[in-house]
Amino acid sequence: MATLYVVSLEDYSGKSALCIGLGKKFMSYGLSVGYMKPVATTTTKWLAGQLISEDSQFMKQVFDLQEPLDVLTPVGLDPALESIIEGEADLGFERRVREAFKQVSRGKDVVIVEGARTLMEGAIVGLPASKVAKLLRARALVVARYTRHSVIDELAAAQMLLGGSLLGAVINVVPRQQLPYIEEVAVPFLEKEGIKVLAVLPEDKVLRGVSVQDLVEALGGQVLCCPHMTGELVENLTVGAMTVDSAIEYFRRTTHKAVITGGDRSDIQLAALETSTTCLVLTGNLEPSSFIIGRAEEEGVPIVLVPHDTLRAVEIIEEVFGKTRFYHEKKIQRFISILDKRFDFATLYKGLGLRG
């Protein structure tokens, strides 16, 4: 059995996406796949009186796993911290992880282990990434979000922390204009330093997109129509602050967009509904006319009413883009197609002792 430990240097780097994409690829080769997230941190919630990891809950569905959620994520960091601070005795965190892994790995060809937000998170309970890798005898794949030249320094730090456990690296969300530099300069340098780069993945609008429901939650908005369409992805953001004469031509340049405009701008709202618009975000708590709502319903375009002014709404949405969880089928399929083109599966399989 092979164990792949997917870790990152910071949150929203693409760990979950990589776990899903690689897991689906393993399954396509007829391999049975297990999953666990030993230490859960910020993405936890209470369910039926139990603190669970949202990532583990989603992976349980994706991979059709039979293990209960408290096995898929045996250590919740927040309650563990409270216990440690309050001076409780040894809570056996390492033992919990070992026992959970034994259950998760039973009958599996590959187990994908998802790391915490950073390589050091979990250290207070004795489970930083380096310790987990040794404990589970896993090979680590570190995914780093592109951050100019600092990504090279960060991967060098990962190599120091993970040592011989490190199998390779993935550089993710690279702007298209930076791909030549990363591929022709950065990758050769890293590989000369002993860090094998298995993929350089470009920035992608679909993967960066957010669902309409994500926007509703971030903006504290109210859905006025088409609630069944709030699962659709928004890939672009457009502000409707122009004259109506130029609005339609302007809106036609962008597809799969959210149009943000004042609730009193029925002319702009109507123009947006004549083009490829995923949702209308109306600011100032000003409700549109019944005619606009009717047209939106005909086109299947949700209208989201928000209390903020247009500037603040734009700021909130821009913060959300690229920082939502990977819980959307369109994103999964898109990411898998990118991996098929750009990921070095041969090196991965060899490093894990698998046949591809």
Image: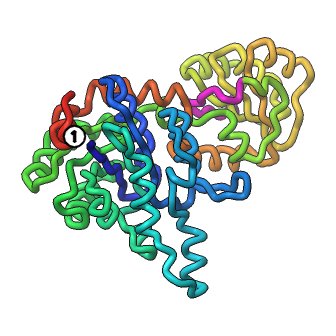
Residue at the (70%, 18%) spot, across then down: 245
Rendering quarter of residue 160: bottom left
Check if residue 241 falls in the magenta segment: yes
Q: Quadrant of the C terminus?
A: top left
Please tell me which residue lies in front, 151 or 283: 151
Q: Position of residue 216 (x, y in %)?
A: 73, 40
Q: Position of residue 72 (x, y in %)?
A: 50, 50
Tell me which segment is drawn in magenta. Answer: 229-242
Q: Answer above or below: position of 99 versus 214.
A: below
**Viewed as shown, does residue 252 lie left or right of 335?**
right
Rendering quarter of residue 106: top left
Q: Quadrant of the N terminus?
A: top left
**Viewed as shown, does residue 21 lie left or right of 50?**
left
Please tell me which residue lies in front, 247 or 345: 345
Residue lying at the far right of the rendered structure:
290
Q: Position of residue 232 (x, y in %)?
A: 63, 26
Q: For mark 1, what is the residue?
A: 198
Q: Position of residue 253 (x, y in %)?
A: 54, 20
Check if residue 321 falls in the magenta segment: no
Residue at the (91%, 25%) spot, across then down: 289
Is residue 44 shown to the viewer in this render? yes
Q: Answer above or below: position of 122 versus 188.
A: below
Please tell me which residue lies in front, 32 or 313: 32
Residue lying at the far bottom of the rendered structure:
87
Numbered marks: total = 1
Rendering quarter of residue 224: top right
